[in-house]
Amino acid sequence: MSIGDPRFFRRSGPHDLATVAKTARGAVSRQSFSLDGVAPLQSAGPRHVSFLDNRRYVSALTQTSAGAVIVHPNLQASVPTSAAAIVTSEPYAAWARVAALFHPPPPVSPGVHPSAVVAENASVDPSAEIGPLSVIGAGAEIGPRCQIGACVVIGAGVVIGPDCHIGMQASLSHALLGARVYVYPGVRIGQEGFGFAPTKNGFVTVPQLGRVILGDDVEVGANTTIDRGSARDTTIGAGTRIDNLVQIGHNVTVGRCCVIVAQVGIAGSVSIGDFVQIGGQAAITGHAVVGSRAQIGAQAGVISDVPSEAIMLGSPAQRKPEFFRQVVTLKKLARRR
C-alpha cells in the first residue's frame, strides 16, 4: 500500500525504474519497469519503491515484496531476487528525493486572496501566493514564487526572498529572509527580546533595535520563536534546521547547517558555530560560545563555552567521558548501599 493520502498529498507517476534510479542518484542493473509510488518495506508491493538505511531491519528487507529497494552497497546482497536494488552510498537522501518525485510539493497559485490586506507600498511579486486573511505591512517585500499561508502577518519592512514558504498564522517583523526559507505554522520571528535593566524601583525596558536575518534554506519549526536583536542582529546561518517549539533569544548567532531539536532554549547573545547539533530540551546560558561541530545532548544544561567538536551531556553539561564516568561511579555507590 502506497503512503501519502491523496486527500493531503499530491501524487505523480507512474515513473519507470530508470527515472527513479536517476532521481535517487543510484545504480540499477535490472531492466526498467513502471513504479506507482513509495511504501515501507513491510507493506510495499511489486509496483512500489522502498528503502533501507538501518541494518537492524535487514529481516524486513529480505521479506519485502517491493518492486525496488534503495540500499547501501553493503546491503545489496540482502535484497530479494524479486526486487530491483537501487544502490547508493546515501540511501536516506536518495529516499527523500524519490519520495519527492512521487509526492511533489503543492504548486504556488499566484495571486492575492480577496480577503488579504496588502499595504499600498508593499511589493508583492506577481508569481507569489498570498493566502486568505493575511496581512502584508507597509514597505514589505515578497519575492518570486513565495507562498504566504492563511492568517499570516508580515510586518512593515520585512523582506522575504524567492521561493519561501510561510505557514499559516505565522508572524514576522523586523526580519530579512533569504531564498527557500520554510517557516512552519505558528512561528513568531522578530518580536522584542527579553531585555530590561533592573533598578531599585523596578525594571526599565531596553529597546530592541536589531533584526532577525535568516540565511538561504533555513527551516523554522512550528511555534518556534526567534527574538530580534537588541544592539546587533539575531542571525541564523544558511541550511540550518530548527525543530518545533524552540526559543532563540536576542543577539544569538547560529552558524550554517546546524540542527536544533524541539524545546531547546538558547539565551541571548549566544554564539553557535557551523554544523552544531543540539538535542531536545537542551538549554544554553547567555553569552556562551559553542564551537563548530559540537554536539549537545538532550536536556543538557550548557553554562559555559563549548569547544569545537566536543560532545556535551548532562546538567551542568560536561564532556561525554566525564559524564559517563560519574554515572558509573554513582551506580557503584548505589549498589554498595
Image (cartoon, rainbow, N blue to C red):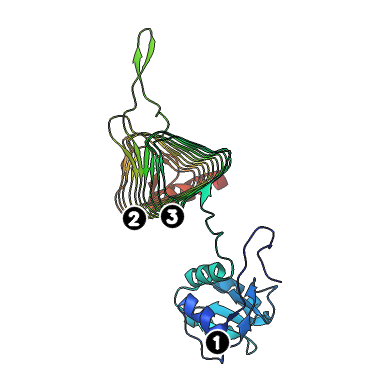
Q: Is residue 307 left or right of residue 241?
A: left
- Give the amino acid type for the residue marked by disc 3 in the picture: Asp
Give the x, y percent position of residue 195: 37, 24
Give the x, y percent position of residue 93: 48, 69
Numbered disc in front, either 3 or 1: 3
Q: Closer to the camera, 158 or 269?
A: 158
Residue underneath mark 2: 293
Residue at (31%, 33%) from the top-left corner?
210
The label on residue 45 is none
N-terminal label among 2 and 3? 3
Residue underneath mark 3: 163
Res 4 quadrant in image: bottom right
Would you say the residues marked 2 and 1 are in contact, meaning their CB atoms lie under 8 Å apart?
no
Q: Closer to the camera, 132 or 288?
A: 132
Crowdedness near tag 3: few (<14), some (14–19) or many (≥20) residues, C-alpha within 10 Å: many
- Give the amino acid type for the residue marked by disc 2 in the picture: Arg
Crowdedness near tag 1: few (<14), some (14–19) or many (≥20) residues, C-alpha within 10 Å: few
**Residue 9 visible somewhere in the drawing:** yes
Would you say the residues marked 2 and 3 are in contact, meaning their CB atoms lie under 8 Å apart?
no
- Give the amino acid type for the residue marked by disc 1 in the picture: Ala
Residue underneath mark 1: 77
Q: How many marks?
A: 3
Give the x, y percent position of residue 68: 60, 81
Would you say the residues marked 3 and 1 are in contact, meaning their CB atoms lie under 8 Å apart?
no
